[in-house]
């Protein structure tokens, strides 16, 4: 199975190298730096404990596990807003192709 989200520092591309170093085990998988969970989803362990310092990330996974229907509804709302904003951006860009136009989907950093 593939990770549910992409995460900075993800290990998806490194799995072939990492996998060679993992002994066969039947115990509990413990992922203290879970991130996107590429290794976890690749291994598909029967028993696991996952954690990460990013509380929002862990909140996302708890939502997937415990309240998927509500999380799905929230994600659908976010997707709808994104698509509306994207449409508005594309229309503005057509009118002003050489100018900077507002992109409501862009997060200020």
Image (cartoon, grey):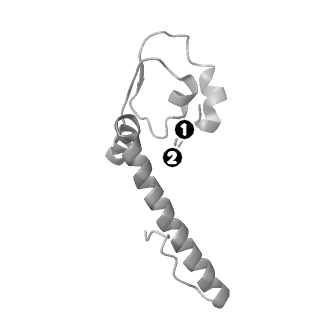
Q: What residue is shown at x 51% (from left), y 66% (from top)?
A: 82
Residue 16 visible to the viewer: yes
- Examine the rendered structure and indicate whether residue 40 appears above or below residue 57: above
The residue labelled by disc 1 is 3
The number of discs equals: 2
User: Label 1: how many residues lie within 10 Å, few (<14), some (14-19) or many (20+)?
Assistant: some
Residue 20 at what x, y percent from top left?
63, 19
Compute the Cα span from label 2 to label 1.
9 Å
The answer to whether marks 2 and 1 mark residues whose Cβ atoms lie closer than 8 Å is: yes
Q: Which x, y percent locates residue 63?
A: 36, 41
Placement of 59 over or under 88, stated as above or below: above
Disc 2 crowd, CA 10 A, few/some/many (<14, 14-19, 20+): some
Q: Quadrant of residue 89?
A: bottom right
Numbered disc 1: secondary structure: loop
Q: x and y percent of residue 84 in the render?
A: 52, 72
Find disc 2 in the rendering and name its residue: 7
- 54 in relation to 105, above or below: above
The quarter of the rendered structure image containing the C terminus is bottom left
Q: Is residue 108 above or below residue 33?
A: below
Q: Is residue 1 left or right of residue 35?
A: right
98 relative position to 85: left or right: right
Q: Residue at x 52, y 73 (%)?
A: 85
Residues 47 and 24: in front is 47
57 displayed left or right of 40: left
Asked which quadrant contains residue 88, the reply is bottom right
Residue situated in front as seen by the camera: 79 or 20: 79
Residue at point 62% right, 34% down? 14
Residue 96 in sight: no
């Amino acid at each position: 199975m593939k990770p549910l989200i992409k995460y900075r520092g993800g290990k998806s591309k490194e799995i072939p190298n990492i996998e060679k170093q993992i002994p066969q085990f039947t115990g509990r998988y413990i992922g203290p730096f879970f991130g996107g969970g590429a290794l976890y989803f690749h291994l598909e362990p029967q028993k696991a404990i996952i954690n990460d310092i990013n509380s929002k990330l862990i909140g996302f996974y708890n939502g997937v596990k415990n309240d998927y229907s509500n999380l799905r509804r929230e994600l659908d709302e976010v997707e709808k807003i994104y698509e509306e904003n994207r449409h508005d951006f594309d229309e503005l860009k057509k009118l002003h192709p050489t100018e900077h136009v507002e992109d409501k989907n862009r997060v200020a950093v």
